[in-house]
Structures are given as structure tokens and as C-alpha cells.
């Protein structure tokens, strides 16, 4: 507790007195703390009525992509890093570089930008070059030189599969096949992963690994990949999801496993939903809907989502921006699947909040311009005083999927 307090005092002091980003921290003081309104004894956050139009949303998406590309330019290699107000740029994150590739490829597809495709390919080639002999990819930042991690490996597979679909280059499929063989080889008989899992404990958010396995199965027709994905999915549904939709063993820590973060809850739901849709399996889709609907209910009631939720869905801690964007993505996918306009409305309202957080209304250096912070306000416990690249990645994904959903309503509308 004391150590945490000392870190926060230091971060506040250094940020406000010595860093060029002091204005961002002070802005959050003004917007979040001083701007709160209290109605009928309930705190209503100040951004709840802010609505952004199509042009403003497009500008927000463009700024997010520019920042991601700036992140890549700031690295010594072709991966993507994160920016911390106190320490500056990290080295590249192997895991998040993998799924950021998918984001910028999607953006390039809708914006016809060959230079971005070339950047994605460079990142993919770098990821292939740092693949471990086992077939897995390391955890954390590249400079940490850590062992392989199950979850991280799944996310690199996502990006390489997407590059393969764009380029047709067999080396990417050779790489992901090696990775999938490794994942299958270390899975426990119970269907979960423990060896090479983060912190060495089974976690339900590996549903977000099952989907890449299924995508490689679609390409290779190797039944083993489908079987192992199903084993993990069945373990989650049979043993780890409560009747109210909450998940056991869902946090990325051991200490706070009784109240996981929205980030990993959303990973779990999105993984289930993606797998259910790939398999056309109503049981898996319904499991995802059960959890997504609970968060939908909480969001409609409070107009925001907390950073953590316990087994009764009681929230705590400041909002985690990554998780907010991820659950918006889930709701948008559910809109596409069900046609329920309420999912689309909730996702658009969540995206309004995220655009508000990104729209700091002041001049910024390129290290932060367009980026989404880990938490709102920026001093929240998750990635405090930092702009993790995955937060901006999911923000961009959500805006692009929202635009796609709006075209379903009005297919004749121009880009």
C-alpha cells in the first residue's frame, strides 16, 4: 500500500512539474473530478451526454491509426510499443504487435493505403523472426526476452493469419501452424492451459486463443486445432461461468482474481462469441450473450463501466479504456448477429465516451496525439499515466466496426 502511494505521488509530481504531458493530467482533473454532476445522490460522469458526429468519429479513427503508426516508427524494430508519461516509449510488445497488424490491415482495406499494408507486412516478418524454436511467442516487451506465453502466441497468430490472407505468402501459414502445434502439445487434458500460461495459472480469457486456432483450422483443415479449441471452450462453459454470466479465473493477476478487470472479461466474452460464430454453435454464442448482456445492463444504468467486477457484478475502480472499447466491439458483433438495435446504440454511446477521452482539445506532441490512455482518468490503477498501444488498437477496431454496422442500416451511404 505504501509503495503504491509513493509511486502515485511520484508520478503526479513528475508529470505535472517536469513533463510536457502535464496538460493531459490537469485536464483529467478538470474533466473527471471537477466536472462530475450528482443527480438524485448518484454520480453522473460528465461525458455521458456528449455525442460526436460521423465526421468527428472519422477524425478520431484517423488520429488513432496515425498514433499507432507513430508507435511503430518509435521502435528499434518493426513492432509496436506503448508510451509512458514518466519513462517514455517502451520497446515493442510482441503480443500486441500481432493483433495491431489486424487493425491496420483493416484500416488499409477500407482506406486503400498500400503503405500501411507494407508496414503490416514488415511487422509480420519481424514477428516471424522472433518466434521461439518451440513455435510460441514470448510475453511482455521484446527487450524482456521472456519465455513463450499461450495467450500472447494466440494474438500473434491473429495478425499473421490476416497478413497471409492479404499476401498469400506461405511463410506466414508455416509460422502459425508451428505455433498451433505448440499450443495443442502443451494443453492440459482438462482442456485448459497451465504450462506457459501467464503466471502459470489457467485462465478463461484463453477463449481469445481458441478463435485463432479455429481460424487456422479453416485454412489447414487440421482437425486437431478445432478439437483443442473446443476442449478449452467446454472447460470454460462447464466449469468457469456462473449462472449470472460472471467468470471465475478471469483476471490477469492472482491477487485480484475475485474481481477481474473489464479488459480480460471482455477478452473472454469476445473469444466465446467469435468461436461461437465460427462454429455456428448456439450454446457458445448464448454463453457470450449472457455475460455481454449483464455489462450492457450495467452500462445502461450507470452510463459507464467500472474497471473491475466481482462475482455479483459489483463494480470497482476507474474505467479501463481498453475494456470499454472491447465490450463495445462485442455489442457491435451482437448487433450484426441479432439485429438488436440496442446493442448498436450502447456501442455508439461507449464510443462517444472514448472519443471524448481521446479528444483532449489541446495541442499535443505526436507521442500522445490520438492515443487512448490505459485508464480514465489517466491516474487509474490500470496502466497509470500511460498510453498502452492495445487501448488505441481496440478503440480503432470499435470505430471501424461501428461504421460497418451503420452501413447495414444504410447500405447506400458513402464512406
Image: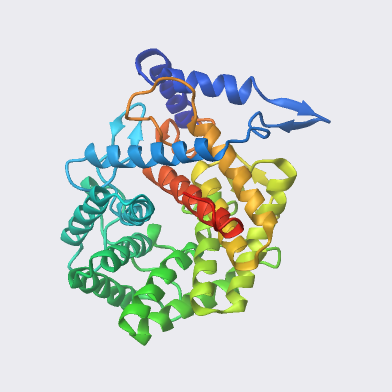
Residue ID at (33%, 55%): 105
Picture quarter containing residue 11?
A: top left
Whether residue 126 is visible, yes or no, is: yes
Q: In the image as oriented, which residue stretches furthest toward the top?
A: 17
Residue at point 58% right, 63% down? 336
- Residue extending farthest to the right is 40
> In screen coordinates, is 30 left or right of 212?
right
In the image, residue 163 sits, relative to residue 52, either above or below, namely below
Residue 148 falls in image quadrant = bottom left
Give the side of residue 407 with respect to residue 175, left or right: right
Colour pattern of the rendering: rainbow
Where is residue 36 shown, x and y percent of the image?
68, 25
Image side of residue 8 versus residue 291, left or right: left
Tell me if 146 is positioned left or right of 229 in this view. Answer: left
In the image, residue 301 sits, relative to residue 225, either above or below, namely: above
Between residue 140 and residue 70, name the one nearer to us: 70
Whole-percent x, y for residue 106 in the image:
37, 55
Q: How many marks?
A: 0
Residue 23 picture location, percent across and down: 45, 18
Does residue 26 lie above or below 397 as drawn? above
- Front residue (pair 412, 341): 412
Which of these two is toward me, 404 or 395?
404
- Of residue 72 and residue 132, the one placed in the foreground of this image is 72
Q: Looking at the picture, how far across and down is residue 351, in whole percent?
A: 56, 43
Residue 260 visible in the displayed image: no
**Looking at the rendering, which quadrant does residue 368 occupy?**
top left
**Residue at x 33% of width, y 42% of height:** 68
As displayed, is residue 282 above or below residue 157? below
Amino acid at each position: 500500500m505504501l509503495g503504491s502511494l509513493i509511486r502515485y505521488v511520484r508520478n503526479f509530481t513528475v508529470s505535472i512539474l517536469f513533463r510536457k504531458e502535464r496538460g493531459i493530467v490537469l485536464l483529467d482533473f478538470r474533466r473527471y473530478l471537477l466536472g462530475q454532476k450528482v443527480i438524485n445522490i448518484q454520480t453522473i460522469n460528465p461525458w455521458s451526454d456528449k455525442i460526436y458526429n460521423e465526421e468527428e468519429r472519422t477524425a478520431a479513427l484517423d488520429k488513432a491509426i496515425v498514433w499507432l503508426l507513430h508507435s511503430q516508427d518509435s521502435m528499434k524494430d518493426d513492432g509496436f510499443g506503448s508510451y509512458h508519461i514518466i519513462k517514455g516509449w517502451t520497446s515493442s510488445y510482441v503480443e500486441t504487435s500481432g493483433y495491431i497488424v489486424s487493425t491496420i490491415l483493416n484500416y488499409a482495406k477500407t482506406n486503400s493505403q498500400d503503405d500501411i499494408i507494407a508496414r503490416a507486412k514488415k511487422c509480420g516478418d519481424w514477428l516471424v523472426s522472433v518466434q521461439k524454436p518451440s513455435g510460441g511467442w514470448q510475453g511482455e516487451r521484446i527487450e524482456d526476452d521472456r519465455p513463450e506465453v499461450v495467450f500472447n502466441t494466440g494474438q500473434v497468430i491473429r495478425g499473421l493469419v490476416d497478413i497471409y490472407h492479404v499476401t498469400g505468402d506461405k511463410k506466414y501459414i508455416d509460422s502459425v501452424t508451428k505455433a498451433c502445434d505448440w499450443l495443442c502439445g502443451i494443453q492440459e487434458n482438462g482442456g485448459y492451459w497451465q504450462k506457459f500460461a501467464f503466471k502459470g495459472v489457467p485462465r478463461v480469457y484463453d477463449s481469445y486463443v481458441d478463435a485463432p486456432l479455429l481460424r487456422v483450422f479453416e485454412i489447414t483443415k487440421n482437425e486437431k486445432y478445432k478439437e483443442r479449441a473446443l476442449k478449452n471452450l467446454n472447460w470454460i462453459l462447464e466449469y468457469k461461468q456462473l449462472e449470472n454470466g460472471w467468470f471465475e479465473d478471469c483476471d490477469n493477476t492472482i491477487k485480484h482474481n475475485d474481481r477481474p478487470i473489464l479488459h480480460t472479461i471482455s477478452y473472454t466474452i469476445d473469444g466465446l462469441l467469435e468461436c461461437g460464430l465460427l462454429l455456428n454453435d448456439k450454446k457458445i454464442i448464448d454463453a457470450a450473450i449472457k455475460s455481454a448482456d449483464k455489462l450492457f445492463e450495467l452500462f445502461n444504468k450507470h452510463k459507464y463501466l467500472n474497471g473491475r467486477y466481482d462475482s455479483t457484478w459489483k463494480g470497482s475502480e476507474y474505467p479501463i479504456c481498453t475494456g470499454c472499447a472491447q465490450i463495445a466491439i462485442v455489442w457491435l458483433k451482437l448487433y450484426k448477429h441479432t439485429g438488436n438495435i440496442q446493442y448498436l446504440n450502447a456501442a455508439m454511446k461507449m464510443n462517444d465516451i472514448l472519443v471524448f477521452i481521446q479528444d483532449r482539445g489541446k495541442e499535443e506532441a505526436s507521442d500522445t496525439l490520438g492515443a487512448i490512455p490505459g485508464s480514465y482518468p489517466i491516474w487509474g490503477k490500470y496502466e497509470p499515466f500511460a498510453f498502452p498501444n492495445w487501448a488505441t488498437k481496440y478503440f480503432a477496431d470499435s470505430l471501424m466496426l461501428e461504421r460497418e454496422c451503420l452501413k447495414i442500416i444504410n447500405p447506400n451511404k458513402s464512406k
